[in-house]
């Protein structure tokens, strides 16, 4: 990242100015409701890279929830040499100026050709470790409306269903009891930039974002501008609205599966409960069965579709799940059997 502008020392004043430009009512209503109604022990953690989005989020949280204990989490991927080190120094100085605690981590075993997914996994593993130490369950993330459109286009390319297309969610409970919060999903990148510039804020720019090494960068730099221009309308707002609708549909389907309760405590799937159900319901029930296994198999998309078809037929079947064992259908139930 490179520095933008000259350093400012009155960070609380900048937070107040950004808060005036982007009032609490501009943030996502689901996150506002969560903040108003949820009482969790421990601090609120904020993923803080030093970039404009994460800095805007940190300033807004300081402006709108001044009474809350906030801890910033910065993960140094160590992929850009001196730039990465400078990012960490910037985050330290910023947090000191705001009176916010900072916890940092570094990726010591990163490969030079590490993928975007590997970097993200390493970063979130650090977040999870630090939150456990802090006894925190809330992680605030700075995804904004442009990120919705980018994610939607990327996941369409790999054939995601409603669950994947509904990402990133404003309030997203995780399997380990934490919750991810994204209050900026109602705001465009341009709106954040305008508010930050008006407040005289400085931030870091990641030089790797100007290259086309990663799929997201290519979508952001090439596909998204052409798509928005071709739409002839506010395509970012349209993508955000589509994401909301997809999340509603996904939640409805999940509640339908809940009402059927086809997965027993014995980790067997009662196929009689799924007879005649739409494929979307059976698909979700099968996903739940696989995840309920002590060590879920790494099943390919093709393998999953074959198993799904067998579940729909309900006929006696023995399907290999690799070296761990078999999925066995018999007497109207799907069970796991060791090989």
Image (tube, rainbow, N blue to C red):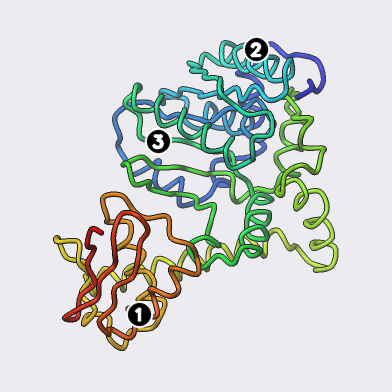
**Mark whose residue sits in front, 2 or 1:** 1
In the rendering, at what x and y percent does residue 309 appear? 40, 80
Residue at figure coordinates x 55%, y 28% from the top left: 63
Q: Which residue is mark 2?
A: 89
Q: Which residue is mark 1?
A: 310
Disc 2 vs disc 1: Cβ atoms closer than 8 Å? no
Q: Is residue 155 above or below residue 143?
A: below
Q: Residues within 10 Å of mark 1 (few under 14, many from 20)?
A: some
| Inter-mark Cα distance, 2 to 1 | 56 Å
Per the rendering, the mark at residue 138 is: 3
In the rendering, at what x and y percent does residue 67 appear? 42, 24
Q: Quadrant of the N terminus?
A: top right
Q: Which quadrant of the view contains residue 202? A: top right
Task: Give 288 or 66, whichever is nearer the viewer.
Answer: 288
Q: Mark 3 or 1 closer to N-term?
A: 3
Q: Residue furthest bottom?
A: 276
Q: Quadrant of the C terminus?
A: bottom left
Q: Residues within 10 Å of mark 2 (few under 14, many from 20)?
A: few
Q: Secondary structure at mark 3?
A: strand
**Mark whose residue sits in front, 3 or 1:** 1
């Amino acid at each position: 990242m490179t520095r933008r502008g000259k350093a400012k020392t009155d960070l609380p004043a900048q937070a107040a100015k950004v808060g005036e430009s982007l009032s609490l009512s501009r943030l996502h209503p689901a996150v506002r409701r969560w903040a108003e109604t949820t009482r969790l022990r421990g601090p609120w953690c904020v993923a803080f890279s030093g970039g404009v989005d994460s800095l805007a989020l940190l300033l807004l949280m300081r402006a709108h929830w001044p009474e809350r204990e906030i801890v910033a989490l910065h993960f140094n991927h160590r992929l850009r040499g001196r730039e990465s080190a400078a990012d960490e120094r910037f985050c330290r100085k910023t947090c000191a100026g705001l009176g916010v605690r900072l916890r940092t981590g570094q990726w010591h075993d990163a490969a030079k050709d590490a993928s975007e997914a590997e970097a993200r996994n390493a970063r979130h593993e650090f977040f999870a470790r630090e939150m456990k130490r802090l006894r925190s369950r809330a992680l605030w993330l700075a995804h904004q409306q442009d990120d919705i459109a980018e994610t939607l286009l990327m996941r369409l390319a790999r054939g995601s269903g409603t669950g994947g297309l509904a990402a990133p969610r404003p309030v997203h409970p995780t399997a380990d009891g934490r919750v991810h919060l994204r209050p900026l999903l109602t705001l465009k990148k341009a709106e954040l930039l305008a508010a930050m510039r008006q407040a005289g804020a400085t931030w870091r720019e990641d030089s790797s974002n100007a290259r086309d090494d990663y799929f997201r960068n290519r979508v952001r730099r090439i596909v998204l501008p052409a798509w928005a221009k071709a739409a002839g309308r506010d395509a970012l707002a349209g993508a955000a609205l589509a994401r909301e609708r997809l999340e509603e549909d996904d939640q409805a389907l999940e509640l339908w599966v809940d009402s059927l309760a086809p997965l027993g405590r014995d980790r067997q799937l009662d196929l009689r409960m799924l007879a005649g159900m739409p494929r979307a319901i059976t698909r979700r029930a099968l996903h739940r069965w696989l995840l309920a296994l002590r060590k879920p198999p790494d099943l390919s998309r093709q393998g999953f579709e074959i198993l799904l078809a067998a579940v729909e037929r309900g006929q006696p079947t023995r399907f290999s799940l690799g070296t761990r064992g078999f999925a066995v259908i018999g007497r109207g139930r799907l069970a796991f059997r060791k090989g």
